[in-house]
Every structure is written in C-alpha cells, then in structure tokens.
Amino acid sequence: MTTASISRRALLAGSTLFAAWTIAGRPVLAQQVDTDDFKDMKPGQYTWHPERSPEGPVAIIVSIPDQRVFVYRNGIRIAVSTCSTGKPGHDTPTGVFSILQKDKDHHSDEYNDAPMPNMNRLTWSGVALHAGELPGYPDSHGCVRLPLAFSALLFTITQIGTVVIIANAASDPVDVDHPGLVLSADADKDIAAQADKLKSQGQPSPDDPNAVTVSVLVSSPDKTIEVLRNGDTIAKGPATISNPDQPLGSHVFILEKTADGQMKWCAIAHGETGQVDTTVIDRVRAEPDVIKAIQDSFHVGLVFVTTDLPSTPDTRTAKNFVVMQQEPDPTQ
C-alpha cells in the first residue's frame, strides 16, 4: 500500500502567516489569525496564544454546532481553531473523552492508509483529533479534523489523559475555589493538607511516559463514585448525594494550582444547556476507602466528572455518552 505524502507551501501575507498544505494531494489551508471573535473565523483559521497561560492542565472543548475547537490551559483559553466534525451518517460522538494515544505520523487502517498527521486518539474504534480538510461544515467520518499547522501546535501540549469534551453545548470554564466533595465533610481542613503536598508538584510534561492521570466519576442514577488511575478502576463505592432528586448535570471539574500554590477546580458544563452549577461538587460525599484512594492519587490535573446517566460499560460507549472512556488497546 502506498503511503500518501504531505507537502507544504507557505507565504507571508501582511502580518499573518498563511500556509497552503496538501494531504494526499488535497489542499489543506491553515492561517493563524489574531482575533478574539471566533465566530467570524474562516475554514482553516486558528489562534494560538500559549503565553496567556504557560503551564497547567490542558482541556479541549469541541463545539459541534460552531465547528470550533477551544483549548484551555489552567482554565484560561489559549487557542481557538476551526474544525470539521462527522458528516451525517458518521456523526462525531459527544461526551467526555481522554486522549488514549498520540501518533504524529499516523495513517488510517480503515481509510486506504490516509495520512492523519498529529493524531490524538479518543477511541480505539477510530475517533481522533487530527489534521485534515476543512470545508467549513461537518465532513469527516467521525473524527475531528483540524488545520495542519494548528494540529502540530496542539500536539506539543497534549498528553495521554488530556480531557477532550465534544458537545452540542458547553460552557467556558468557571473557577470553583471550594474543593467540596473530593475529600470529606471537613473539606477545608483536609484540602489544606493536600495543598501542602502539591506545592512543589507541576503539570507532567506531554512527553513524560510515566505520567499518571486520575479521574473520578460520579453517576447520580447509580449513586456511585468510581476512581480510575490511567483508566483502571482503583476504588468504587456508594456516593451520598444531597438533594438526590435534583440532577447533578454533565460537569467536568479539573484540579488546578494557582500561582500562589493554592488549589482550585476549573468547572466545565456540557450537554443540553451547557450551564455550570458550581454547587454540584459540594453535594457529593464518598466512603472513607474511596476518599483515601483519591487522596493517595491527588495530583494537579485530577479530573472529576458528574453525570445523570448510569455508569455502565454500555452507557459509557453509547453514541452520546463516552465518559473518560478508556477502552482496551486491541493491539495488546
């Protein structure tokens, strides 16, 4: 099978870099622009301002209606890009994903060895972020296509476990200073002890093969809380939820560290309304063994997810719900 080639032609137009690329002989445009009005961006355009937040956990939001990708680091938006998601019949699944695999020079096993540069895999069944054509509307077979130049920049800051939210509606991140549920009813005292442990801890390098990612999943229908380390369940137990008749909503909380060494949650809501409820994290309590598992694994970048869907393998892999999906690697 012949490997398709990637070529590049770039020219400077005014103060903006415009690049014309081809992937498998098809033109792929990429243009870095300096604007905060993402709604008027043309296909192939993107912004990139990593200096706005030089370090911290990265979170990526893909808005299907807007055909935009938003990149946040430590809760601050550092980039926006145009994209192309799945066309009718090949819809891009929505939900909360974590990056499972990275491959800078990936080629498709399913689509005639087609090049998919700067691939960040979201499912083993074929959904990924990668460079590709951007016609200005959903046109992929389920992946999220990005401008090639932007995908190369994004590849440098993602790592295995980076959170990717694909949604029809999603909020901008909101800071939540009170850690609430993660520890115990005496959260203020416990969080101070954990903060001391994290003062010298930074965000792992994207290239660190030993980086550990921990996620906590709370399902309101099941009333369960589950702790996963690198995708493996290390603790699970009952969750006590105050006002149980009130939905928790679809939220992602990412633990971040401020410049003065304090901890905070960065909250993102997704789903039908995309509205953050900052009280959600205070409504959940866990049993001592689950709390201990969280405390023992506490780290900058820890992810806490709430859902009003059952926490079962079937619902986690359903079309509209992939919460921190860590599928078995079929190559192992």
Image: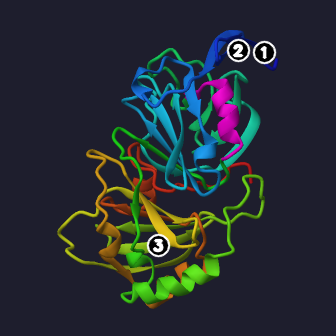
Q: Are marks 1 and 3 in contact (CB under 8 Å)?
A: no
Whole-number angstrom distance, CA of label 3 to CA of label 2: 45 Å
Q: Vertical placement of 235 versus 269: above or below?
A: below
Query: In this orientation, which residue lies closer to the viewer: 95 or 57?
Result: 57
Quarter of the image for the N terminus: give it: top right
Q: Is residue 96 left or right of residue 2?
A: left
Q: Amino acid at mark 2?
A: Trp
Q: Vertical placement of 86 versus 27: above or below?
A: below
Asked if one can make out residue 123 in the rendered structure from this viewpoint, the answer is no
Magenta-drawn segment: 145-157
Measuring from the top left, give residue 195's x and y in whole percent. 56, 79
- In the rendered structure, which disc, 3 or 2, sits on the residue that comes first in sequence? 2
The answer to whether residue 114 is magenta is no
Residue 179 in which image quadrant = bottom left
The answer to whether residue 151 is magenta is yes
- In the rendered structure, which disc, 1 or 3, sits on the residue that comes first in sequence? 1
Which residue corresponds to mark 3?
226
Which residue corresponds to mark 1?
7
